Image (cartoon, rainbow, N blue to C red):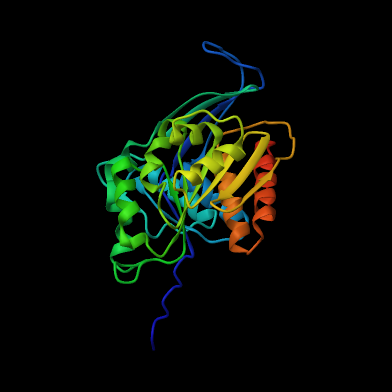
Amino acid sequence: MTQETAPLPQILAIGSVLWDVIGRANHSMRVGSDVPGRITRLPGGVAMNIAMTLTRFGEAPAVLTAVGRDAEGEELLAAARSLGINTDFVYHSADLPTDRYMAVEGANGLIAAIADAHSLEAAGDKILRPLRDGRLGSASTPYDGTIALDGNLTRSLLEEISADPLFAAADLRVAPASPGKAERLLPLLNHAHATLYVNLEEAGLLCHREFDSAETAARTLCERGAARALVTDGGNLAADATADTVHTATPPQVLVTRVTGAGDTFMAAHMVQELRKSPRPDALTAALKAAALYVSGETAQ
């Protein structure tokens, strides 16, 4: 009797998987505000947020990340598995703690946030071992599925990935973790198989200029070498550009009740639409709708 081999996951989310500690208030806030609200702890991180959204749409992603061998890490992975996320390929570190993210949100949006992703950064290319050792791929047979890559990785590791044959056959979908880490994506700007997902501010940081519209930003990123760029601008027009074409759409207008994770939701929803072979204009519209539902406090299906 032969043992059946489990099929490889068709989508990987590589990057931060951590605990999100979010304080939300229904009041507008400024520096020094002290107001009543709610504090929650939920699985988060760019890679985790993308993976969670993918599972809501019926996909079965795997995450490549670093998690500590601590109670927080075990609890986090258990939560991920309960959501349908494959954690078989996670790197477990005995000497690094599980990462965390802390944010404060008011009625006027994100007030401040701190991302403690030092363990992911310290783990470096250890999180990529399954792509080398035959579990997910190797140099001779690189992984050929879809990869969501998150800017919480160090710039040096992203530089390695940009030239690594392990990623030569994959459909790379790339997003910064935050505007402060946008320039880490520069090594991937000219990657032939990479699609960039950025907001207007992040596009400006990558191009070292300010933009007044997502359409102009997306066109400029392609002029700078990007194979494809999707640029969002909150509730304003969003754009999906290649060197040849640009598609635009406006998000539905909703009451915003949360903002952390909105960009990750947009990216994951867009990836799902494209996996289902939706035309580019339809995929953009559907992803914007999913992100709008998310920020309104609802869940897209």
Give me the residue at 37% from left, 39% from top. Answer: 184
Hey, which residue is sitting farthest left in the picture? 95
Task: Give how far across and how far down residue 179 sits, in percent.
Answer: 47, 32
Which of the pair 259/55 is nearer the observer?
259
The number of callouts visible is 0
Determine whether 145 is above or below 209 in the image. Answer: below
Determine whether 64 is above or below 219 in the image. Answer: below
Which of the pair 103/178 is nearer the observer?
178
Which of the pair 69/252 is nearer the observer?
252
Can residue 120 be seen here? The reply is: yes
Task: Give how far across and how far down residue 245 sits, in percent.
Answer: 61, 52
Can residue 299 be seen here? The reply is: no
Q: Is residue 20 left or right of residue 152?
A: right
Task: Give how far across and how far down residue 48 sits, in percent.
Answer: 48, 47
Hey, which residue is sitting farthest bottom in the picture? 1
Task: Give how far across and how far down residue 253 sits, in percent.
Answer: 75, 35
Picture quarter containing residue 168?
bottom left
